[in-house]
Amino acid sequence: MSEEIRWVQAATADDLWEGDLLDVEVDGESVMLVHLLDGGGIKAYQGMCPHQEILLADGKWDADKALLLCGGHNWEFDLTTGKGLNPTGCRLFEFPVTVEGDDILVGVPQDGQRHHNRFETP
C-alpha cells in the first residue's frame, strides 16, 4: 500500500532563485526550500533544526558548498542530502518536490504525523 501524498503549492520560481533558501508553511508544516546551484534542483526539508527547533532558514547558508549552519548551536547540514555533518547521525526530514511551470509543489504525506526529525545529543 503506497502512502498518500498531498501536493501543495509552496512557492513560485520567482520566490526561490538558484542559490537561495526560503522558509514556507505548507499544510501547517514548517518547510525550508533550497534551490541548489549548478543544476542541483530544488529540495524541501523540515524547517526547524532537529536539535532545538530553531528556524533553519535563519542560519548561515553557504550556497557554493550547499552547507547550512544552524544559528542556534552551529549544527551543520549538507542540503544536497539533508544529512547532518556536525553532529553526525542526524538527518533532516525531506519532503518530495516537483515543479510544474513556475509553481514549486511540496508533497505532504497524509499519514497524520508531524514531519520533522528530532535528534538528542548524547
Image (spheres, grey):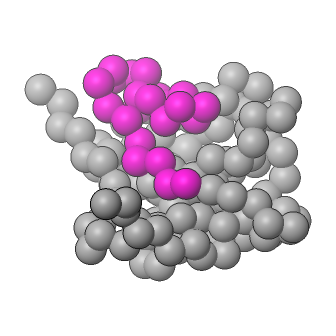
At x 62%, y 56%, the residue is 97
Q: Is 28 placed above or below 88 here?
A: below
Q: Nearer the viewer, residue 13 or 85?
A: 13
Residue 39 visible somewhere in the drawing: yes
Residue 54 visible somewhere in the drawing: no
Q: Is 87 placed above or below 30 here?
A: above
The residue sitting at the bottom extreme is 27
Q: Nearer the viewer, residue 121 or 44?
A: 44
Q: Position of residue 11 (x, y in %)?
A: 72, 70
Q: Quadrant of the N terminus?
A: bottom left
Tell whether position 55 is magenta: no
The quarter of the picture where residue 96 lies is: bottom right
Q: Position of residue 45 (x, y in %)?
A: 51, 50
At x 27%, y 74%, the residue is 112
Q: Quadrant of the C terminus?
A: top left
Q: Nearer the viewer, residue 30 or 56?
A: 30
Q: Which residues are magenta?
A: 75-96
At x 41%, y 42%, the residue is 92
* Left/right of residue 68 with respect to residue 51 in the rendered view: right
Tell whether position 78 is magenta: yes
The residue sitting at the left extreme is 122
Q: Position of residue 41 (x, y in %)?
A: 75, 42
Q: Is 98 placed above or below 50 here?
A: below
* Left/right of residue 9 with respect to residue 13 in the rendered view: left
Q: Position of residue 78 (x, y in %)?
A: 54, 28
